[in-house]
Image: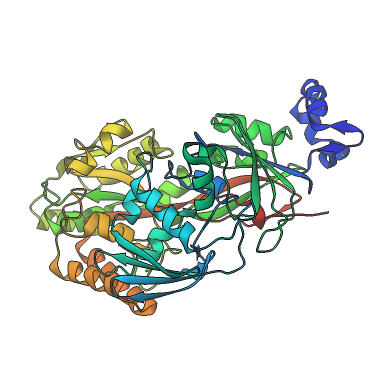
Amino acid sequence: MRSHGMDRRTFLKRGVGLGLGALAGSSWIQAILAASKERLTILSSIGLDSLHPYAYSSAPQYGAWQHMIEPLVDIDYAKRQYYGVLAESWEFQGNKWVLRLRKGVRFHDGGPFTAKDVIHSINRIKTDKQSMQAPNLSDVTEMQSPDDYTVVVTTEAPSAVFLDHLTNRFMISKAAADKYGDQTDQHPIGTGPYKFVSWQRDGNLVMTRNDDYWGPNPAIKEIVLKKVGEDAGRVAGLLAGQGDIINNVPVDELSRFEKHPRVRAEKVEGLRMYFLAMNVTHKPFDNQLVRQAINYAVDPKAVIKYIYEGNGYVMDGPVGSNVIGYDPKVTRYPYDSKKAKELLAKAGYAKGLEVKLYFSPDRYPKAREVCQVIADQLLKVGVKTELVSQEFVIFWGKDGVNGGKLPFYYVGRPATDADTVYDQYFRSGSSKRVEYKNPEFDRLIDAEQKSGDPKKRVAILQQASRILMEDVPFVPLYTLAEIYGVARNIIWQARPDEKVLSADMKIRS
């Protein structure tokens, strides 16, 4: 970016000697450092490790790719429903989904987007050895294209949640794959609002506006995404004007943004739901009264207030408020230490009990501090809690959560649809994470996964949530705010799914 006869690099070199305090106090410097319609720089905690479009399974990386390549469907979080991107409409027909594609869409090289590209993309997601997204489409058994703009997808069994599995599954060009062969990933060609320019591992991903985009043209011409893994480095870069947007702002850094002339904080309730899981095959968690007592004993409001400085949202039920299947009528167990003690006594633990609470400090923010607060709360009702810290690879592996070896643990799980959580954690036989079994709950999950009526599906999911809140093989805690640092002249509303999509942004003059 050039302004006042000085390019950004030259200015930043001169600005180092001034110090950040001097930078913040100068109004003319503020104008120089603000994002322009020519270029916007994103400092991200996660970058692209390769140009393989399917070698990822994290939201920030999905967000980087979605500038250039697009999904068939996406989610309107405010309405809690799906909407079409490259697919205009769809129809659920038992174990078949009929997808009708948007016409007039072209790839960056000018080639038309058709059903062949969809079939090619899904096949590569399923079969590529480096794909980390194959499990999402593992139930796809056949695909047909009656014409260039219709795809019929057959699944092993009726799957009403197939649209959820299509989110973040991006469509690439078959013609480009045929042309470049093994080198196709070095030529990222999509249909998105931005085109690929260049990329360096652990460096910059540079993209330029696609002026032939099928949708509204983006306001900003060039996007630079730079990986800055350290929280302090991203914050310092934003405050120094080396970036215009940063993600994952630590809550203890927020005060630096409050009166800053150039930057502001942008917050939105995130999709990751935090809870305490109780494996019901382990004592004392096989006892429903104990599980209910622990729900009464834990106060997530205190965790949000003292650990996250108020930047969280208490969960009243099994899923957060922006998740498909959320039930606003469900309420959590109120904090009631007296009731907790009564239930423990009724369960045969009048003198208290001892448990271990497992957590992974390298995976969830401030996990150690959170679990310490929870342990203190449990101690007040007679539950002495030993905290066990584990590296995530051990915590999450066959000797941990997914092996059914941990009786009691702190975990976070993002989801856009309640089915994702219910199926993975609470449906009989799906995993060993909790080992919960309830025939009526299983029946409801079977029914919602086969229902072609979205409203009926939601009603069934809500009914299932009420069963979970009675049996409580978990303690719902909270969702956290996704916090971004943003230049004040950028008009942008953050998404709850951790994606930073530049096409949604405008620059205030």
Give how far across and how far down residue 51 sits, in percent.
Answer: 52, 38
Q: Where is 154 relative to 62, above or below?
A: below
Looking at the image, the residue that sits furthest to the front is 179
**Who's the residue at 45% across and 49% down the image?**
304
Spot occupied by residue 441 in the image (x, y as percentages of width and height) = 20, 68
Q: Nearer the viewer, residue 115 or 493?
A: 115
- Tell me the quadrant of the picture where the C terminus can be found: bottom right
**Which residue sits at x=67%, y=59%?**
213
Q: Answer with the quarter of the image where residue 232 lies.
A: top right
Vertical order, 114 against 484 (above or below): below
Q: How is the image coloured?
A: rainbow
Image point (51%, 43%), residue name: 61
Instruction: Please tell me which residue lies in front, 21 or 175.
Output: 175
Left or right placement of residue 382 versus residue 67 in this view: left
| Residue 83 as seen in the image, left or right of residue 258 | left
The single residue placed furthest to the right in the displayed view is 5
Q: Which quarter of the figure has residue 70?
A: bottom right
Q: Pick out the residue farthest to the left.
A: 348
Q: Quadrant of residue 107?
A: bottom right
Image position, residue 294 (x, y; %) = 24, 52
Along the viewing direction, whichever of 170 and 376 lies nearer the viewer: 170
Task: Give the tally of numbered discs.
Answer: 0
Q: Is residue 17 left or right of residue 171?
A: right
Q: Position of residue 364 (x, y in %)?
A: 40, 40
| Image quarter (top left, top right, bottom left or bottom right) of the N terminus | top right
Asked whether residue 205 is in view, the answer is no
Residue 229 makes an appearance in the image = yes
